[in-house]
Image: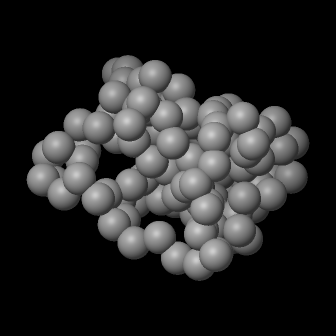
């Protein structure tokens, strides 16, 4: 069963991420969209973050809300991101979501993959 939960129970969403998610939703013109975070095997460190927009929430999904936007994490991926902080960064290398993840024992240089 899907559940909406506050950010204290699993994933925190930084102000920069809230602003970027809001902007992406406005650009798409679909207020039902949420940012989905998934974890897959791969990347240079073992696991890889996947970010996508999704307007569906499944039975095994948890929705974390902050500032009027939602972030969806499925139950399988949640242990990998529990306690993490989602942010958005824009610099000379580009603009991208970042995860400050206390579960990661190491990360790759670009921050898109990690190991536990």
Up the image or down, 20 lies above or below 27; here it is above
Query: What residue sits 73% from the left and 71% below the top?
Result: 76
- Let me know if residue 59 appears in the view: yes
Q: Is residue 81 left or right of residue 94?
A: right
Q: Is residue 96 left or right of residue 50?
A: left
Up the image or down, 4 lies above or below 85; here it is below
Q: Position of residue 100 (x, y in %)?
A: 68, 32
Q: Position of residue 74 (x, y in %)?
A: 63, 67
Q: Quadrant of residue 33?
A: bottom left
- Between residue 113 and residue 100, name the one nearer to us: 100
Up the image or down, 82 lies above or below 61; here it is above
In the rendered image, the quadrant that contains the N terminus is bottom right
Query: What residue sits 83% from the left and 44% below the top?
Result: 103
Count the marks: 0
- Let me know if residue 98 appears in the view: no
Query: What residue sits 72% from the left and 35% below the top?
Result: 8
Q: Quadrant of residue 91?
A: top left
Q: How is the image coloured?
A: one colour
Q: Is residue 35 left or right of residue 98?
A: left
Q: Position of residue 71 (x, y in %)?
A: 50, 50
- Between residue 68 and residue 99, name the one nearer to us: 68
Q: Position of residue 56 (x, y in %)?
A: 39, 72
């Amino acid at each position: 069963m899907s559940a909406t939960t506050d950010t204290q129970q699993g994933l925190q969403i930084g102000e920069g991420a809230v602003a970027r998610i809001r902007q992406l939703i406005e650009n798409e013109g679909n207020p039902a969209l949420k940012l989905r975070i998934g974890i897959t095997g791969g990347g240079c460190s073992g696991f890889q973050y996947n970010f996508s927009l999704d307007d569906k929430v499944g039975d095994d999904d948890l929705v974390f809300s902050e500032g009027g936007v939602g972030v969806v994490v499925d139950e399988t991926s949640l242990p990998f991101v529990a306690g993490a902080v989602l942010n958005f960064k824009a610099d000379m290398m580009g603009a991208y979501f970042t995860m400050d993840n206390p579960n990661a024992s190491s990360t790759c240089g670009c921050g898109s993959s990690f190991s536990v």
